[in-house]
Every structure is written in C-alpha cells, then in structure tokens.
Image (cartoon, rainbow, N blue to C red):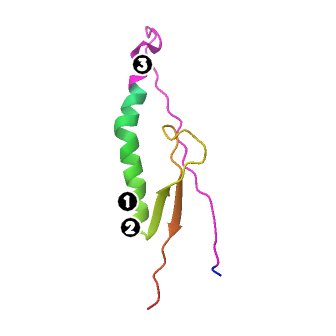
Amino acid sequence: MTHQEQKTFSITLHLSADFEDDYTGDEDGFVWYERFQQTVRPALIAAVHDALRTQRFRAVAAPRGRDPESALDLDVSFEPKRSP
C-alpha cells in the first residue's frame, strides 16, 4: 500500500470591467469577458500546465461540478523520480 498526502491550492480571479458614465448597459454582449475567455484564459491554463510540468507535476482536468467555462479544476500529482 502506498502513502498519499493531499493539499489544496486555489487561484481565484474576480473579473470586472469599468465603463464611462454614458455606458448604456450590457448591449456589447460582455465583449471584454469574451476577450478574456478567448485570449487570457487559454494563456493562463497553458502557463499553469507548463509551470507544473517543469517541476515534475502532472495535471489532469477534474471538474468538480462547476461550469468548466468559469472554473478550472485540476487534479495535480507529483511524479517523484523512480529508483532503478
């Protein structure tokens, strides 16, 4: 039987956009959020995976009942060097 240790680490981003006083509402369809989803989110996900990989961690998507468009849940496991 193997020994397993577990911890949780969270990164939460609270997104917002401020508009001028003459802003007429959500008529733009949340373009600023779509820009985040199309450009920033994929770059953040890639950076997280790259950082983990360089330190011998493996990450697998593991949604925990949250909307995958608004959350990134990963199961991350350390891959120690195996003795010969």
Point out the image quarter for the C terminus.
bottom left
Examine the structure image and report whether residue 21 is included in the region drawn in magenta.
Answer: yes
SS at mark 3 in the image: loop
Q: CA distance from mark 2 to mark 3?
A: 38 Å
At a point 63% along the width and 63% down the height, the residue shown is 7
Q: Residue furthest bottom?
A: 84
Measured as percent of width and height from the top left, residue 10 is found at: 57, 51
Q: Is 6 or 22 nearer to us in this picture? A: 6
Q: Which residue is mark 1?
A: 50
What amino acid type should be assigned to the residue bearing mark 3? Gly
Disc 2, disc 3: CB below 8 Å?
no
SS at mark 2 in the image: helix
Q: Report the magenta stretch's main SS.
A: loop
Measured as percent of width and height from the top left, residue 32 is found at: 40, 26
At a point 39% along the width and 34% down the height, the residue shown is 36
Please state the extent of the stretch shown in magenta in the rendering. 3-31
Q: CA distance from mark 1 to mark 2?
A: 6 Å
What amino acid type should be assigned to the residue bearing mark 2? Thr
Q: Which residue is mark 3?
A: 29
Q: Which residue is mark 2?
A: 54
Please rate how many residues cluster around mark 2, counting C-alpha atoms within 10 Å: few if below 14, some from 14 to 19, many from 20: few
At a point 52% along the width and 42% down the height, the residue shown is 71
At a point 37% along the width and 52% down the height, the residue shown is 46
Measured as percent of width and height from the top left, residue 28 is found at: 39, 16
In the picture, residue 48 is in which quadrant?
Answer: bottom left
Q: Is residue 31 left or right of residue 61?
A: left
| Mark toward the start of the polypeptide (3 vs 1) | 3
What amino acid type should be assigned to the residue bearing mark 1? Asp
Measured as percent of width and height from the top left, residue 3 is found at: 64, 78
Residue 6: mark in rendering = none
